[in-house]
Amino acid sequence: MAILQNGPNGPITGKFGSVSAYILNGQNVVRGPKRKRTSPPSESELLNRNKQKVAGRFAGDNSYIFDFGYQFLAEKGSRIGAFQLAQRHIFKEALELDSENNPFVNPEKLVVFAGQLTPLSSCEVNLQGDTIALKWTPNIQYDYSTYKINLALVGLEGQSHLMTSIAEVQQGACTFQFNGISRKNYDYHVYVCIWDTLDGDFSNSTYCGVI
């Protein structure tokens, strides 16, 4: 049943006859019934579906990291939240094709944290037993204790981990214990970002390498 809102000149919502009406971005849209497709999907359509599947699965496996890492880019009240922004980035910018034309996430193109602050120009990571050592080039504009380093360890085929405020940006280096990481059976890709803990913003992540 369709509903005529606000009198005869108002928008119509609902179904009447063979068509449906709804409001989209402030516009009254009327659509006819969907037609059943008879032709098979093209190769490009199949590839696009595979890319969507890979991006969606990867984003879902790391949703708690992306919900945190994209929080300052998500507009309040928008239907597109932090997770959707991260998923869009993965699909458009972080996917590549292997020799068999299968999509995969390129960790060097992946942005785990996203924001408006200037990212670190470089960061190196080293694993010594259960100790992770990070070293980066400090930036004079972050010479305050409110600017912290966030860390993400992303396993492309396994668990991922998020650690926040592990050090001040001005330190330029830090080490910390991660019990059991020396016994890992897959690689972790390491990402860091700057966090303005006072005003609330991130830099885009810097890729540090793999451990």
Image: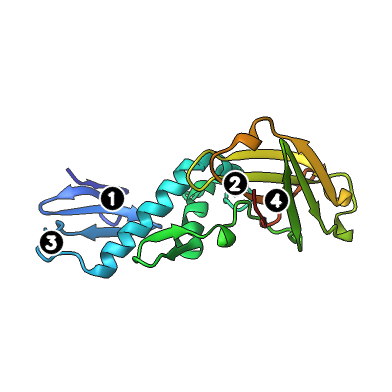
Distance CA(mark 3)–CA(mark 1): 38 Å
Reading the image, the residue beneath label 4 is 192
What is the C-alpha distance between the residues marked 3 and 2?
A: 43 Å
Q: Is residue 55 left or right of residue 148?
A: left
Residue 27 occupies which quadrant of the picture? Answer: bottom left
**Residue 157: where, in percent of width, then height?**
47, 45
Q: State the separation of the CA atoms marked 4 and 2.
A: 13 Å
Depth check, mark 1 against mark 2: the one in front is 2
Q: Earlier in the sequence, mark 1 or mark 2?
A: 1
Please give the count of numbered marks on the rendered protein.
4
Report the disc number at residue 37. 3
Residue in the picture at 82% in, 44% down: 174
Q: Which residue is mark 1?
A: 7
In depth, the one of 5 and 127 nearer the eye is 127
Q: Which residue is mark 2?
A: 188
Q: Are marks 1 and 2 in contact (CB under 8 Å)?
A: no
From where the camera sits, is residue 11 visible? no
Q: Nearer the viewer, residue 83 or 61?
A: 61
Judged from the image, the secondary structure of the residue bearing numbered disc 3 is loop
